[in-house]
Amino acid sequence: MLLKKQLNQTSRHSIVSALEIGGVKIAKDDVVRDDPTNNVPDTIFTKLGLQLHMRDQHPLGILKNAIYDYFDMNYSTKFVKFDDLCPIVSIKQNFDDVLVPADHVSRSYNDTYYIDAQTVLRCHTSAHQAELFRKGQTHFLVTGDVYRRDSIDSTHYPVFHQMEGVRVFSTDEWEKSGIDGTSYAAIDLKKCLEGLARHLFGAVEMRWVDTYFPFTNPSFELEIYFKEQWLEVLGCGVTEQEILKRNGRENNVAWAFGLGLERLAMVLFDIPDIRLFWSTDERFTSQFSEGKLGVKFKPFSKFPPCYKDMSFWISDAFTENNLCEVVRGIAGDLVEEVKLIDNFTNKKGMTSQCYRIAYRSMERSLTDEEINQLQWKVREGVESKLKVVLR
Ligand code: PHE
């Protein structure tokens, strides 16, 4: 399945010109093209096909396997597992099939990576729900890499991994319980996920929060208390009847959840920064082994951050996600955080913003000279690509 290049970890960052995922052959210029309907940068293409979740010795693979164990144990291997579905999907799969409204922000070029006007890098594993219903699946887990344009901090990275779980009930399952199908599914869902959280964490503080997703109703989020704050780790709910109806399941009810593997793994393995999941440094990779969930990561030493501020007059088209993409395109994984620290509008109606960029390597100390050079390149890149006026 995987390209040979990807199996060889040391060369994973070399540019591959073609790869194959889940039987689909992908060439670089199928994904990255210089035309206005495409917004996929090279840095994102290099992540395609790496499939960290398929590595049994990687924290994400270890976590995936531990979740598989929970489902195998509790549902006697009834859940069918998919972890090699191609991340290139149509906007129909990613949005329409799961009832995302036409004007929803997640459809914008600011939030999603578009390959062309009809094709995206999936922004959630829910993109595969409808096709799997149509194929007759009733109990399934879909694990994969997902892609989102976003701001930069220690818990956000433009590529991360999700696991989707879906269970379909037939009428007789809830009818004999005396409660309606939706309530029946909601109770079962919460019980299943609380059990999963206990299986993974043992005792951990958690809470349910009511929320909204276009594809479920009711919808909930599970949050876990980590490093003095509540961290959202999964979204879930009772599948909208319309989705079931359109895909051959009119008389059923179902629940679905989508969980963020990095978020859970950060808590379980004490991994302080999401960039570390991509590290090929042996001091990171050698700390984890197959089947060992929750081994606490020992930082190899804490390297100091270096902060650089930059102010500019923004234009109407400016967005923070675009800024972050430019910064990451130049500084790569040396950028730890990009944070708005000042924002004002003058009498002429011009808005100035100041961003603080934190540079820090997870692996070594950075020299002043190196940071200064990076910052110059970032300033040039921001000015030329984002049409802002530096101050
Ligand atoms: N797709 C949602 C997300 O990415 C998560 C989710 C999956 C929510 C399934 C409800 C049901 O945020």
Image (cartoon, grey):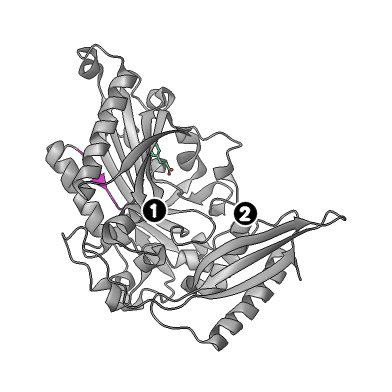
Q: Is residue 84 in the magenta section?
A: yes
Residue 386 appears anywhere in the view: yes
Residue kind at label 2, given as amino acid type: Thr
- Quadrant location, the C terminus: bottom right
Residue under label 2, please give it. Answer: 37
Residue 239 magenta-highlighted = no
Q: Quadrant of the N terminus?
A: bottom left
- The numbered mark at residue 94 is none
12 sits to left or right of 118: left
Query: Which residue reaches farthest right?
Result: 348
Report x, y in % for residue 135.
Answer: 30, 34
Residue holding disc 1: 228
Residue 76 vs 381, above or below: the answer is: above
Task: Give the distance between the C-alpha atoms of the residues marked 2 and 1, in whole angstroms.
Answer: 42 Å
Q: Residue at x 28, y 21 (%)?
A: 184
Q: Is mark 1 within 8 Å of ligand 1?
A: no
Question: Label 1 amino acid?
Answer: Glu
Q: Earlier in the sequence, mark 2 or mark 1?
A: 2
Indicate if the residue with disc 2 has its beta carbon within 8 Å of ligand 1.
no
Q: Position of residue 89 (x, y in %)?
A: 45, 48
Question: What residue is shown at x 22% (from left), y 46% (from top)?
Answer: 203
Q: Badge 1: few (under 14), some or many (20 or more) residues near its Cα, within 10 Å?
A: few
Closer to the camera in the image, 309 or 105: 309
In the picture provided, is 209 more to the left or to the right than 32? Answer: left
Residue drawn at point x = 32 percent, y = 70 percent: 6
Q: Is residue 216 above or below residue 23?
A: above
Q: Position of residue 149 (x, y in %)?
A: 53, 55
**Vertical arrangement, residue 105 with respect to residue 55, above or below:** above
Disc 1, SS: loop
Q: Which residues are magenta?
A: 79-86
Most foreground residue, 183 or 209:
209
Q: Quadrant of residue 296?
A: bottom left
